[in-house]
Image (cartoon, grey):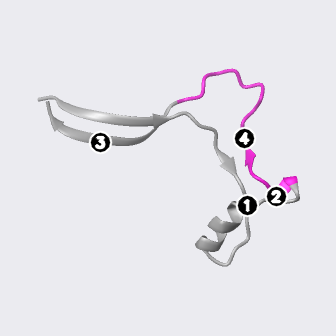
Amino acid sequence: MLRQYVITGTKTFTYYKTVQATDIVNAHLLAHEPTDDPIDDWTSDFDESYDEPIPMVVTHIEDEGEV
């Protein structure tokens, strides 16, 4: 018996930003506020010299049932 699946994937870079906040809602809001100090802004682990393809990351698999 075969089943049909729809698979969602994405190829992205991961960015990081550290904030000090009172709770998770405040942290979310602070993450989107601009900053004057570049060291406090979003950063990425992306290496400019990296020449391999970016891997696909599966983010969701939906079972559509029996075929």
Using the numbered discs, state the Cα–Cα distance from disc 3 to disc 4 in whole angstroms: 30 Å
Q: Residue at x 40, y 37 (%)?
A: 8
Q: Which of the two labelled residues, at mark 2 and mark 1, occupies the earlier sequence position? A: 1
**What amino acid type should be assigned to the residue bearing mark 4?**
Asp
Residue extent of the magenta highlight: 38-55
Q: Check the image and name the residue furthest to the right.
A: 37
Task: Give the numbered dot on residue 62.
Answer: 3
Identify residue for label 4.
45
Three-letter code for the amino acid on which mark 1 is drawn: Thr
Q: Residue furthest left?
A: 1
Report the residue at 55% width, 29% height from top: 55
What residue does disc 1 label? 18
**Disc 2: which residue:** 40
Q: Secondary structure at mark 1?
A: loop
Is residue 13 highlighted in magenta? no
**Secondary element at image label 4:** loop
Residue nearer the viewer, 45 or 6: 6
Quadrant assignment, res 4: top left
Identify which amino acid the numbered label 3 is placed on.
Glu
Residue 36 falls left or right of residue 43 = right
Sequence-wise, which precedes: disc 2 or disc 4? 2
Pick whichever of labels 3 and 1 is earlier in the sequence. 1
Residue 53 image point, x, y percent: 60, 23
- The residues bearing labels 2 and 4 have C-alpha atoms spaced at a distance of 15 Å
Count of marks, rendered view:
4
Between marks 2 and 4 in the image, the one whose residue lies nearer the viewer: 2
Q: State yes or no: discs 2 and 1 in contact (Cβ < 8 Å).
A: yes
Q: Earlier in the sequence, mark 3 or mark 2?
A: 2
Residue 33 is left or right of residue 58, and the answer is right
Q: CA distance from mark 4 to mark 1?
A: 14 Å
* Label 3 – label 2 distance at C-alpha: 38 Å
Other-residue count near label 3 (Cα within 10 Å), few / some / many at <14 / 14–19 / ≥20: few
